[in-house]
Image: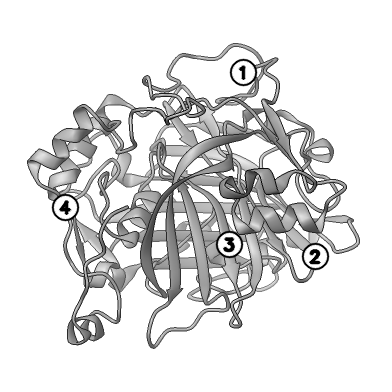
């Protein structure tokens, strides 16, 4: 665990209680990325008992079998779970379970369990990304109290993190293909176990920091831009949303929405933070999409440390299942979800001074190999566990990368869930990059007809 820098009261107040503007490790420390650490910053060695193997380069070879676009749907076919965790034996695995996972086991003792498979460290990235990460380690810096960054491009900005906010930036800047397109469904799970289709959508995502020609000097700072159109249900068909996110805190998110009934595009500044997500019928908050989505500035981010945990991993098979087979009454179908033992970074978020959020405290668990969020626990104002999220990543060797889109958010107090961006039965493709004018309100307005 890293030692935390103790700030004076005056400095802490000046930074709104957030992390200071320092980063960029020394060249000697960055050299660990070529020996004891993986190129993205994880511990290369396995654990003591061998249940976590050493990293040997990840999954870069094409996988045979069925595919959904660029996603291979059969990975480690025929492999059986090493063990199961359920409500009866969970005490035996207490140290490997997050509070949210324990609560689900207790809340649904007859139906929820973890099928734990042998651990496979499939994380991989293009060599150009590895080269960028090595340079980022000594040049990336925090600014604006940690809510902005500079000097980074095309890879993990802080592969040897010292602060919680650096870990979260690693997630926001996670390895992605420069341009992708896919379709997805948002499903609301009701307290009585029934399910409702909130929306079905098509979406295009673009990640400018991963353009082939991107440099720290040429990059605008926009790290994610997307545009989607709603296909179903009929009364919402034709609605569109465009978002452009930037590392510049002064211009962190630009959003535009097209509403069919109004036949016009309008700015959508509330599409962020703890605004209920209208794409999912309000069943989750916007910043719960994909584990975390948007600006970091509502919270202080504390690096708790690293631990071994059971997390969803290598879930290509889940995507290959029919939607009705992938989702059980109150949670994902345990028959379809693959769990593995991995090391995770633990980051605790608490509302920053002078800020507000409906979920005032969260704990994030991020996979060390990929920097992807794996699990999130959210607490109410009284400190009681209120929400928990499971993210189910999948391997795309053609990039190569481990990617994630689907996140399942459980409202534990209401007994409901929101399955966000379910890919089952849809399509997912790595595509040529588009003109960035495609991701603007003007472009949506020009095409907004019904």
Q: SS of the residue at dot 1?
A: loop
Q: Is residue 152 left or right of residue 99?
A: left
Estimate the x, y position of residue 317 in percent, counting from the top left: 68, 28
Residue of label 2? 415
Q: SS of the residue at dot 2?
A: loop
Q: Which quadrant would the C terminus be assigned to in this image?
A: bottom right
For marks 3 and 4 on the same chain, the one whose residue lies earlier in the sequence: 4
Q: SS of the residue at dot 4?
A: loop
Q: Give me the residue at 39% from left, 67% from top.
A: 296
Q: Give me the residue at 42% from left, 84% from top.
A: 355
One can see residue 160 in this view: yes
Estimate the x, y position of residue 136 in percent, counting from the top left: 19, 44
Q: Which is nearer the eye, 239 or 398?
A: 398
The label number, if any, that marks residue 151 in the structure image: 4
Residue of label 3? 377
For marks 1 and 2 on the same chain, the one whose residue lies earlier in the sequence: 1
One can see residue 449 in this view: no
Estimate the x, y position of residue 255 in percent, counting from the top left: 47, 66
The label number, if any, that marks residue 76 in the structure image: 1
Q: Which is nearer the eye, 339 or 181?
A: 339
- Please say if 440 is above or below 44: below
Q: Give me the residue at 47% from left, 33% from top.
A: 402
């Amino acid at each position: 665990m890293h030692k935390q820098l103790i700030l004076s009261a005056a400095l802490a107040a000046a930074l709104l209680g957030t992390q200071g503007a320092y980063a960029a490790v020394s060249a000697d420390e960055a050299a660990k990325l070529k020996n004891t650490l993986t190129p993205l910053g994880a511990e290369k060695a396995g654990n003591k008992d061998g249940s976590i193997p050493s990293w040997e380069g990840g999954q870069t070879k094409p996988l045979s079998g069925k595919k959904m676009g660029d996603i291979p749907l059969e990975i480690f076919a025929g492999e059986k779970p090493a063990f199961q965790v359920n409500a009866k034996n969970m005490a035996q695995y207490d140290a490997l379970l997050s509070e949210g996972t324990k609560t689900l086991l207790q809340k649904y003792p007859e139906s929820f369990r973890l099928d734990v498979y042998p651990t496979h460290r499939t994380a991989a990235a293009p060599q150009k990304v590895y080269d960028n990460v090595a340079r980022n380690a000594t040049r990336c810096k925090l600014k604006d109290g940690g809510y902005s960054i500079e000097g980074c491009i095309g890879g993990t900005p802080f592969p040897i993190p010292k602060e919680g906010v650096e870990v979260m930036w690693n997630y926001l800047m996670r390895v992605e293909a420069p341009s992708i397109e896919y379709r997805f469904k948002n499903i609301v799970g009701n307290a009585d176990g029934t399910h409702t289709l909130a929306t079905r959508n098509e979406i295009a995502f673009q990640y400018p920091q991963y353009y082939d020609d991107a440099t720290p000097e040429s990059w605008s700072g926009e790290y994610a831009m997307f545009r989607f159109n709603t296909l179903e249900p009929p009364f919402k068909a034709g609605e569109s949303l465009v978002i452009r996110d930037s590392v510049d805190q002064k211009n962190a998110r630009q959003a535009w929405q097209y509403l069919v009934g109004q036949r016009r595009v309008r700015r959508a500044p509330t599409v962020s933070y703890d605004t209920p997500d209208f794409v999912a019928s309000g069943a989750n908050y916007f910043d719960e999409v994909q584990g975390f989505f948007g600006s970091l500035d509502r919270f202080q981010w504390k690096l708790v440390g690293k631990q071994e945990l059971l997390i969803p991993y290598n879930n290509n098979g889940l995507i290959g299942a029919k939607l009705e087979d992938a989702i059980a009454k109150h949670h994902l179908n345990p028959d379809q979800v693959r769990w593995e033992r991995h090391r995770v970074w633990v980051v605790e978020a608490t509302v920053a001074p002078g800020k507000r959020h409906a979920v005032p405290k969260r704990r994030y668990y991020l996979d060390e190999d990929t920097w992807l969020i794996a699990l999130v626990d959210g607490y109410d104002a009284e400190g009681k566990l209120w929400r928990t999220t499971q993210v189910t990543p999948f391997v795309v060797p053609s990039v190569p990368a481990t990617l994630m889109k689907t996140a399942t958010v459980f409202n534990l107090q209401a007994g409901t869930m929101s399955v966000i961006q379910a890919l089952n039965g849809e399509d997912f493709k790595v595509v040529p990059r588009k003109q960035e004018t495609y991701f603007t309100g003007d472009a949506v307005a020009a095409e907004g007809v019904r």
